[in-house]
Amino acid sequence: MHAYRMQQLIKERRKDDVVNVSQRTSVYQTIQRLLRDGLAEVASVERPDNRPERTTYRITEQGRTTLHAWLTAMLSAPTPEYAEFPAALSFLPNLSPAEALAALDTRIVHLEERNSALDAEIAEVVSFLPPLFTVESEYQRTVVQAELSYVRGLVTELRAGRITWPFVDGRPVWDG
C-alpha cells in the first residue's frame, strides 16, 4: 500500500497509541529506511488522472524474516525503557510538597481519563474483532491502572506526611 494509506490504517486500527504516525513525514522516513535496508520494495508507481504520483510498497522476504526475528526478541526479552515519569519522580525533591501534590493530582486526572478511553476502545474493538486485536490496549490499560494505583498511593503518603523533604526559605536544602 502507499504511505498515506499506511498512516490511515494505523489510525483506523488505533495502533497510533503504540506507533507514532502523527506526522506523515515520519512514515515516509521509515519507508525510506526499510527500502534502504532491503526490508521493503516498491510494488508499483501509479499516477491516476490528475492526481499526484502514488507509490505502493510491499514487504520483502528479508523484511518478513527480520520482522519475525524482531517480534520474537521483543516479546521474549524485556529491555530497559526510559520513560519520563520515573525520571521526573527522581527529581521530585526539587518541587515543594504542595507543587508535587498539585502535579500528581493532575496526573491522576489524566490517568483516569486515559483508563476510561482505553476501556471504551477495547469495548468497541471487541464488538467486531477477536480479543487478539486488543492485546496492546489491554497491556496499556494494565500499565495505566498500575501507575494510577502507584500515584494515588504516593499522594496519600505525601498528604499524610509520611514522605517529606526539608526546605529552608522555600528551597530544598540541597539546592545550594
Image: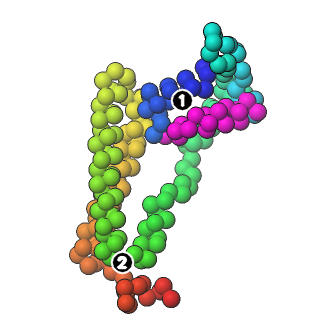
Above-or-below relation of 144 to 68: below
Q: Confirm whether the magenta stretch covers residue 169.
A: no
Instruction: Identify residue type, mark 2.
Output: Ser
Furthest residue in direction left, as rendered: 160
Furthest residue in direction front, as rendered: 50
Instruction: Point out which mark residue 33 bears.
Output: none
- 172 relative to 59 in the view: left or right: left
Q: Earlier in the sequence, mark 1 or mark 2?
A: 1
Instruction: Identify residue type, mark 1.
Output: Gln
**Residue 109 spot, x, y in % from top left:** 29, 54
Residue appearing at x 33%, y 64% in the figure: 104
Could you classify mark 1 by the number of other residues whose Cα lies within 10 Å: few (under 14), some (14-19), or many (20 or more)? many
**Residue 42 spot, x, y in % from top left:** 71, 21
Nearest to the observer: residue 175 or residue 165: 175
- Which residue lies under the disc numbered 2? 96
- Which quarter of the figure has residue 124? top left
Residue 19 in view of the camera: no
Q: How many marks?
A: 2
Could you classify mark 2 by the number of other residues whose Cα lies within 10 Å: few (under 14), some (14-19), or many (20 or more)? some
Q: Secondary structure at mark 1?
A: helix
Magenta span: predominant SS is: helix
Residue appearing at x 43%, y 32% in the figure: 14
Nearest to the observer: residue 128 or residue 51: 51
Residue appearing at x 70%, y 26% in the figure: 40
- 4 relative to 150 in the view: left or right: right
- Which residue lies under the disc numbered 1? 7
Quadrant for the N terminus in the image: top right
User: Which segment is the magenta one?
Assistant: 18-36
